[in-house]
Each structure stands twice: as C-alpha cells, then as structure tokens.
Amino acid sequence: MKLKNLACAAACLLFCLPGVAQQQNKFTPKPAVLAIIKKDLAVADAQYKVLAGKLNAEEFPKTYHPETGKQENSGSGWWCSGFYPGTLLNLYEEIPGKFLIDEADRMLALLAKEQYNTHTHDLGFMMYCSFGTANRLNPTPQYKQILINSAKSLSTRFNPKVGAIKSWDSKPSDFLVIIDNMMNLELLFWATRVTGDSSYYKIAVTHANTTIKNHYRPDYSSYHVINYNPETGAVQEKKTAQGFANESAWARGQVWGLYGFTVMYRETGDKKYLDQANNIAKFILDNPNLPADKIPYWDFNAPNIPNALRDASAGAIMASALLELCKYTNKADGRRYFNTAESVIKTLSSSHYRAAIGTNGGFILKHSVGHFPAGTEIDVPLTYADYYFVEAMKRYKVFARK
Ligand code: GLY
C-alpha cells in the first residue's frame, strides 16, 4: 500500500467510525417487474437519443412543455446540469453503446468548469451525480480532481456559527438553508474518503445535525427553508419557497430528506440517522394524503387533493431512497419499503407516466412539478425525475444478484 493510501485509511479510521451501515436485508425482485425495467431502460436509451437531438452546442436539458411543444434548456450553472450526464452514464452501464458514452463525455466537458462554482450549494447534484458516476465507472485522476475541487467549493459555503452550508445567496443578514441541501453531502463523504481530509466529513455531519434540529417538525415532516442569523446561528424564520405554505409538507422536500438521511446512515453508521430516515419514511408512507399508487401530490397539504397534481420526481426519488433504506432497517419495515418502491416503479412505468419513444421532448417521465408557487415547471418532465427513476430501477435490479 502506498504511503498516501495508508494516510487515507488512517484518516478514515479516525474520522469515519463507526464506519458504514451494517445490516443488509435481502428481498426477492419479481420477474415481471424485472421485465418491465428491462423495457423501461431500452425506452430510456431510445428517448435520450431524441433528447440529445434537442440540444444546441452548449445546452443542458431542463424541461419540455407538452401543451406548446416548447423545449427548455439551460447552461451548466443550472442546479440540474449533472442529471443528464449522470443518467446517460447510468444507462450506459446497463446498455453499453457509443451514443451514450460519447454524449456523456461531451456533457462532462461542458460541466467541468462548475467545479469552481462557489455560488451554489447544488454541487453535489451537479458534480457527484455526473462526475461521481463517471469516476465510479472509470476512475481517472482528472475526475477525482474535479470532484475534490467541487467538494472544496461546496465547503466554502459552510458557516460554523450556523453549523450548516448556505443554500441560497441572499441579503447579508440572511443565511438560507433548504432541506434539498441534504443531497449535496454525499460528495463531502466521498472527498474525505479519497483525500483523508476529515473537514469534509465534519461539515456533512454538522450540517445534518443542524438540519435534524431545525428543519424537522415533531411529526418528522420538514420545513423547506430555514433562515438563520449568520452571526449568531439563531433561527430567524421557518418557511417555504416551493411548497404550498410555510407549514405544509412539500413533497419533494420530504423525499430529499428521506434520501439524504439514508445516505447519512450509509456513510457514518450512526443509528441516529437511520432513525431519522425511518421516521421520515413513516411520515410519508402513513400519510393519509399519499395516494394508493404511491406517487405523491406535489405537496402533502396541497389545497385541492385529490385533484392536486402529482409529482413524479418525488415518487422516483422516494423509490430510490427506499430501495437503499430497506437494506438497513428491520425486516418488516424493509419489506414495506421494498414493496412501496416496487409499486412506484410499476406506476411510473405505465403509459400515464412513462413517455412513448419520440414524445415528451425526449424525456423519460411525464408529470413532475418543479416550482408550483412560481408558476414554473408545472406538470412537465424534469431531468431529476428521469435520473432517480433510472437509479431506482438499477437499485431494484441489484436485489436480483445472488
Ligand atoms: N430546489 C430543488 C428542487 O426543486 O427540488
């Protein structure tokens, strides 16, 4: 073992104990669902060829408006820029082919400059879903350096007084943290593992602990936005930006938390995070406003339930998170999570949600809600719905391996 590797191993022993999540339940996937997934992945491969054809030279896909047929694309600085290359790579792992890898490489080259972006907390989404996947499939010193630089950029937004990473830049007297930020912590754990620098790990743990303390209500639903005093760390406001109301449970926020605390348990082995993830899962799954097909309304307290819009992205993120959490928890809860995820995959594979080849602007899923209060991205396809749907299907398939 090289000296540098020894140093990394020692640092992990010191800072990453008790280590990683231990319990690994096993569940048996259904052949019929595996057959659906095989078809879905083939359709996704075909759809992403259509999507690629809608992009000008430096554009990343954002959404598509079914009523007008208008395609909306973005630059690399948009928080979703990592999902398209990440999905291409995840599909490539399933269906290796020249188009998928060439298109992924083209997008990664456009995205690389964001490693130095210190004006967003979304670097985990942007860089870990893309370069993290690229590095998992084909580790290179270049990918590694880009990911380390991204973790450094993200860490510049940590305020020790608040004990959290700043999500959104705003006026100097505000320090805004959104629940979505839990999803950016995985990049920091990776950075400590490969560099041996424990500061990333400590930031992630501190951010998660502050989030448990201030974002969560007694019923384990989450606020969307907490506004802290940046000088004292005191909570100034608890509110929403993308949800129906300050006191409502915005669906995607609930599933970002579910996924984020599952990762926290995986990376630290600390049972406190497993309990948090299980309690969030119970809030969601026992919620009288969760429809029978398990695709959440865009907000659990949307005013016009049962006629409120569904959010397919929340369903996909929830399914992927539950397919990890089901491995760690007790067998009965694990079985419930696995069955729920299976049901979500089946529902999202129906023609109501999964687009036919050549339609939907080339996106895989229909019917997500981006930002209802702002009147943007309502009942449309979104790159992150596709990303987590593909990830959930891959996670389900892993259970078939002996
Ligand atoms: N801000 C990320 C989201 O819309 O979920």
Image (tube, rainbow, N blue to C red):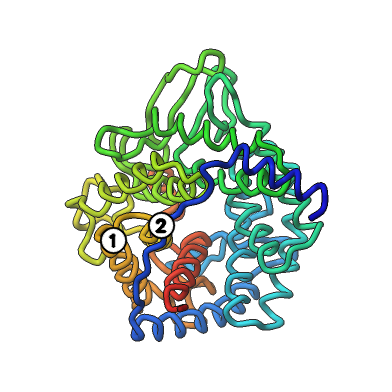
Looking at mark 2, is its residue's CB closer than 8 Å to ligand 1? no
Is tag 1's residue or tag 2's residue first in the polypeptide sequence?
2
Nearer-the-camera pick, 230 or 299:
230
Asked where in the image residue 349 lies, by quadrant, the reply is bottom left
Residue where numbered disc 1 is placed: 331
Q: Residues within 10 Å of mark 1 (few under 14, many from 20)?
A: some
Badge 1 element: helix
Residue type of the residue flagged with mark 2:
Gln
Label ID, residue 23: 2
Residue at the image position 58 percent from the left and 67 percent from the top = 87
Q: Determine the residue located farthest toward the top in the rendered image.
A: 232
Looking at mark 1, is its residue's CB closer than 8 Å to ligand 1? no
Q: In which quadrant will I find the N terminus? A: bottom right
Image location (x, y in percent) of residue 195: 73, 44
Residue type of the residue flagged with mark 1:
Lys
Asked where in the image residue 139 lies, by quadrant, the reply is bottom right
Q: Residues within 10 Å of mark 2 (few under 14, many from 20)?
A: few
Residue at the image position 56 percent from the left and 19 percent from the top = 161
Inspect this view and state whether residue 378 appears.
no
Q: Is 6 left, or right, of 124 in this rendering?
A: right
Image location (x, y in percent) of residue 388: 48, 63
Image location (x, y in percent) of residue 143: 76, 57
Nearer-the-camera pick, 397 or 243:
397
Rendered view: 358 above or below 344: below
Badge 2 element: loop
